[in-house]
Image (spheres, rainbow, N blue to C red):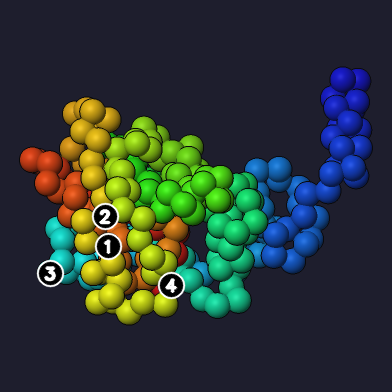
C-alpha cells in the first residue's frame, strides 16, 4: 500500500513539476538525468580517455608536462553539448553541469589512465565573472565528477590573482600572453597531494590550462592530468 501511495505521490509531483529533456523536451523518467535516452545516445563522444597521445594531450606537447589529458565530447555549434554548457554557464542550470561532470567521472573510472590522480582542482573563474554568475562552472562540473570518480575537490588551491580579458575572440598567441602570471597557489590547501586533475568545461587552445599547470608544477614532485567536458 505504501509503495502504491508513493508512486501516486511522485506522479502527482511530476504533473506539477514536469521533468523534460533539455534538448528535445521529451518527458524524462530518471530524475538524475537531463537528457532522454535518445538524446543521450547522440552525445558526440570523443573516446579520448582511453587513448594516449590523443588530440587533447597533443595540445600540450612542448608547452607543459602533462601525465594524461582528455575531453569527453566534441564541442560543435548547435550541438547538445553546446546547449548543456550554455545552460550551465549562462542560465544557472547547475543540474546540467553536474550531469556532464558525472559523465566525465564515469569515463575517468573506465579509462584506468587516471587512477593515480589524488585530487580534483577546478580552473578558477575570473572573480568578476564568478561574482556576476554566482558560481564557477568548472567547480560545478568537478562536483559531478567527484560523485563518480571519488577524489577530494581542492577548490581553493589555485587562486586567480589577475582578472584577465575574455579569451573568446583571441587567437592562440594572444590567449597565451593573456594568461601569463595569472594564477597563484595557496599551498596551505595543497597538503600532501602530488597528482592533481585539472578540470575545465571546454578546451580550445589550452592556454588557461597550460597556465594553471605551469603554476602547479612549481611545486616539487607535482604531476598534472587534465579532464574537460568538451574539445573544440
Q: What is the number of the mark on residue 179?
A: 1
Q: Reply above or below: 46 against 91.
A: below
Q: Which is more toward the observer, 106 or 202?
A: 202
Tag 2–tag 1 contact (CB < 8 Å): yes
Circle 2 packing at 10 Å, graded few (<14), some (14-19), many (20+), is: some
Q: Which residue is mark 3?
A: 62
Q: Which residue is mark 2?
A: 182
Q: Which is more toward the observer, 219 or 119?
A: 219
Q: Choose top left, top right, bottom left or bottom right for residue 35.
A: bottom right
- Residue at figure coordinates x 71%, y 43% from the top left: 31
Provide the secondary structure element on which disc 2 rests. Answer: loop
Circle 1 packing at 10 Å, graded few (<14), some (14-19), many (20+), is: many
Q: Reply above or below: 44 against 130.
A: below
Provide the secondary structure element on which disc 3 rests. Answer: loop
Cα gap from disc 4 to disc 3, whole angstroms: 24 Å
Quarter of the image with the C terminus in it: bottom left
Q: Which residue is mark 4?
A: 168
Amino acid at each position: 500500500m505504501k509503495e502504491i501511495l508513493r508512486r501516486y505521490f511522485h506522479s502527482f509531483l511530476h504533473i506539477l513539476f514536469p521533468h523534460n529533456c533539455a534538448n528535445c523536451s521529451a518527458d524524462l523518467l530518471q530524475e538524475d538525468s537531463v537528457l532522454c535516452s535518445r538524446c543521450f545516445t547522440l552525445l558526440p563522444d570523443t573516446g579520448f580517455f582511453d587513448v594516449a597521445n590523443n588530440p587533447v594531450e597533443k595540445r600540450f606537447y612542448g608547452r607543459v608536462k602533462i601525465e594524461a589529458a582528455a575531453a569527453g565530447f566534441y564541442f560543435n555549434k548547435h550541438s547538445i553539448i553546446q546547449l548543456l554548457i550554455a545552460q550551465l554557464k549562462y542560465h544557472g542550470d547547475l543540474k546540467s553541469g553536474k550531469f556532464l561532470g558525472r559523465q566525465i567521472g564515469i569515463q575517468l573510472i573506465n579509462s584506468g589512465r587516471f587512477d593515480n590522480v589524488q585530487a580534483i582542482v577546478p580552473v578558477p573563474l575570473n572573480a568578476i565573472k564568478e561574482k556576476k554568475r554566482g558560481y564557477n562552472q568548472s567547480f560545478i562540473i568537478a562536483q559531478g565528477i567527484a560523485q563518480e570518480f571519488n577524489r577530494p575537490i581542492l577548490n581553493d588551491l589555485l587562486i586567480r590573482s589577475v582578472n584577465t580579458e575574455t579569451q573568446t575572440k583571441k587567437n592562440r598567441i594572444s590567449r597565451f600572453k593573456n594568461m601569463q602570471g595569472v594564477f597563484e597557489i595557496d599551498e596551505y590547501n595543497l597538503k600532501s597531494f602530488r597528482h592533481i586533475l585539472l578540470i575545465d568545461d571546454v578546451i580550445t587552445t589550452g592556454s588557461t590550462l597550460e597556465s594553471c599547470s605551469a603554476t602547479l608544477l612549481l611545486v616539487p614532485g607535482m604531476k598534472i592530468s587534465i579532464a574537460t567536458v568538451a574539445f573544440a
